[in-house]
Image: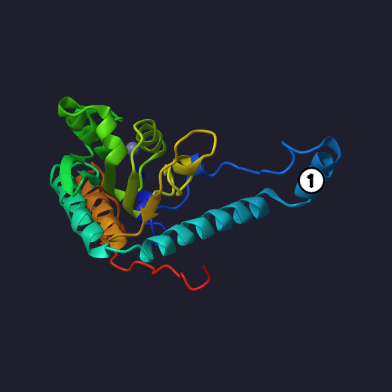
Amino acid sequence: MDFDPSDVFGAAGDFFLLGEAAARNFNDDASSQDPESASSAAKKSDLRSIPEREAERLENLRQKQLGDIAKMATLPNREIHEGFMKEAIAMADLALRSDETPVGCVFVHKGEIIGRGMNHTNKTLNGTRHAEFVALAEILQTHAPAILKETDLYVTVEPCIMCASALRQFNIRCVYFGCFNDRFGGTGGVLRIHEDENVDPPYPAFPGIFRDDAIMLLRKFYIQENEKAPEPKQKKTRELKTEIIPLDLSKV
Ligand SMILES: [Zn+2]
């Protein structure tokens, strides 16, 4: 299981709530500075409580996410991207009907879909069978890896840290995704592997295409899972919430 149901139903009503995996403290004071300023930075940071520093880190993360979505909103040819994302959603829908976490993707090379994938971790009991890995395995059966340099990925949920790293190693050209994955995301949800300057070349990642559909598929899945549980949760928690809080891009 990739995601915790409680996250999708979380109070934010929006992507996933941050969990332990994401709740590390990336305090960037101190380490790469001269000893004097490092020490004063450390003192300064010590004055703030951990919740305060965490709140600031989350706010920075959130602002970057909104900036990414705003960039996507200005991209030309939106209808082309939406067309491919619909194909990815169809794969996520198939995953839902197959009792797999509904995440789907397509890889597009020169306007043609060269690979499709859906999450396949439950039936295989293999936590690495994410939609992206499934599609990549299919593509590499008939193509040389170099094709990925001219290939774009459309995936309903942000690539996780593992997939974001693999995509970078394969030199993917660009990634478009629906909703963020605030627990395991590797392209802005938690880490920003796609643009880390220590590895090259980076790839751009654009979130927000059919974000609501991606979130609703996940919510439907967890309703389904709860109903199958040996001791189903109270009916109240099984209700499908349809409200998705819109993102406020006005301050980006
Ligand atoms: Zn993944």
Residue ID at (31%, 58%): 237
Q: Secondary structure at mark 1?
A: helix
The correct choice, above or below, for 197 with respect to 127 in the image is below
| Image mark count | 1
The image quadrant that residue 107 belongs to is: top left
**Where does ligand 1 appear, by image quarter?**
top left
The image quadrant that residue 75 belongs to is: bottom left
Q: Amino acid at mark 1?
A: Ala
Q: In the image, residue 93 lies at what x, y percent?
A: 16, 51
Q: In the image, residue 43 lies at what x, y percent?
A: 82, 45
Residue ID at (61%, 43%): 25
The image quadrant that residue 202 belongs to is: top left
Q: What's the coloring here?
A: rainbow
Q: Is residue 232 left or right of residue 165?
A: left
- In the orientation shown, which residue stands out farthest toward the bottom? 250
Q: Badge 1, how many Cα within 10 Å: few under 14, some, many 20+?
A: some
The reply to whether residue 129 is visible in this rendering is no
Q: Is residue 120 left or right of residue 1?
A: left
The reply to whether residue 178 is visible in this rendering is yes
Q: Is residue 12 left or right of residue 53?
A: left
Residue ID at (17%, 31%): 138
Q: In the image, residue 214 lies at what x, y percent?
A: 27, 56
Foreground pick, 220 / 203: 203
Q: Is residue 64 left or right of residue 92?
A: right
Q: Is mark 1 within 8 Å of ligand 1?
A: no
Foreground pick, 202 / 231: 202
Foreground pick, 62 / 151: 151
Label 1 belongs to which residue? 41
Query: Quadrant location of the N terminus?
Result: top left
